[in-house]
Amino acid sequence: MLASTRKAPVQRTICRGCESDKLERFLDLGEMALAGGFLPDTEAIASEEKYPLSTHVCRACGLVQILEVIDPEILFQNYSFSSSTVGPLVQHFQDYAKWLQQKFHPELVVEFGCNDGILLTPLGELGIRSCGIDISENITEIAGSKGLDVLTGYFEESMAERIMDRFGEADVVTGSNTFAHNDHPEIILEAARRVLKPNGHLCLELMYAGDLLEMIQWDTLYHEHLTFYSLSSLQVLLKRCGFHVVDAERHPMHGGSLRVTAALDADEEGQPGVAAILEYERSKALADPDTWINFGQHVDRKIEVVRETLGRLSHNSRIWGYGAAGKATLWVNACRMAYLEAMVDASPLRAGKLMPGTHTPIVFPEELRANPPDYIFISAWNYGDLIRSKEGWFQGIWLVPLPDLRFF
């Protein structure tokens, strides 16, 4: 995910959902290193790039989105996140595979953004044929080494044709935490329409604007995550592309997600969960731009609290971080945490590298045991309880930044 030469981002001017030009900025983080732009060594520091990062809301449909679009070839080639290294995600996708089986009894599932095969594996164990697509060649190599059927590239019409030729029509097309990474989601929806049976279903798992608002999850607002959907704003996009929502439910994955089922069959009736979530969104005014303007002001205050508190602690104490995810990049840069001695992460795709922006060394958990600090800042706060239980031997103080800064 590291660019050798700067390529200016494309500045989008219309909404991804409804194509309105009524877009209002509510949060500006300035120039920011890429969330997944982990540096292989100190020699790479000289070529590291930073890009503008601000978030807007559409006044017409309420869609929250980032308009500075980084070339996907920069963002996703040599990708540094392997899903199967995260225990809770493994469990989530095992449960999701069973849910798909029980709800749809599919013969063929197509997954775009399949990563290392974390969903394809349990689908296969259930006897369900599956095909995965991912843009990141290093990740599809990992999936392919497991004997899974994976294709490298974008999920677009030509890819849909390849899948049709090889497997036939699909019962389910799914994508988990990947749909919102795309500047042109209509291309994915067109590909899904092409490959699905007439009575097939599209299942999307998305980071949810409702949880973004409730838990002040500003640290997920980075260049990869171009769009944060509410159900109401997603409905607008899906309808424009020939789908309609028939079911929706909330899940805790990634600090709060929305699982949406959409159908091509216009006669298929919707489930009660759809109306319940739409009512929740009305009660929270998720489509009101003023809601997001207030959110941006709240985020500024939270960043200031963490920056000042940890800055003071760093004068007399040793502080490490834990969890080299995209969230960590935003925290360490926005809060100017150059004082962190190390960032702990169990992934072999990250350990041994340097954090974007601050260039903090990323180390395996074993190094934490060998040299424990006074404080550990849990940047992967959504896994805070799991991390603390895994490292129960630690006698120092844990810090968790969201939903509020807490000490354990």
Image (cartoon, rainbow, N blue to C red):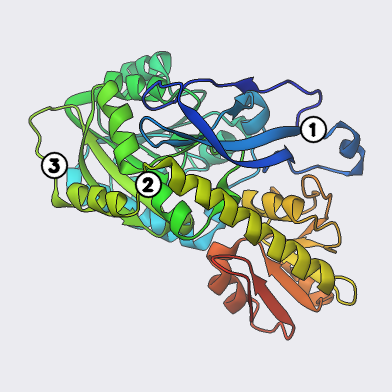
Circle 2 is placed at which residue position?
A: 286
Tell me the kind of residue under disc 1: Glu
Label 2 – label 1 distance at C-alpha: 34 Å
Which of pointers 3 and 1 lies earlier in the amino acid sequence?
1
Circle 3 is placed at which residue position?
A: 270
Residue 144 in the image: above or below residue 342:
above
Determine if residue 348 is in view.
Answer: no
Residue 402's spot in the image, x, y percent?
57, 65
Horizontal relation, residue 132 to residue 358: left or right:
left
Q: Secondary structure at mark 3?
A: loop
Tell me the kind of residue under disc 2: Leu
Tell me the kind of residue under disc 3: Gly
Classify mark 3: residues with Cα within 10 Å, few (<14), some (14-19) or many (20+): some
Residue 49: assigned label: 1
Residue at the front extreme of this rendering? 290
Q: Which image quarter is the C terminus in?
A: bottom right
Residue 45's spot in the image, x, y percent?
88, 39
Label 3 – label 2 distance at C-alpha: 22 Å
Tags 3 and 2 in contact by the CB under 8 Å rule?
no
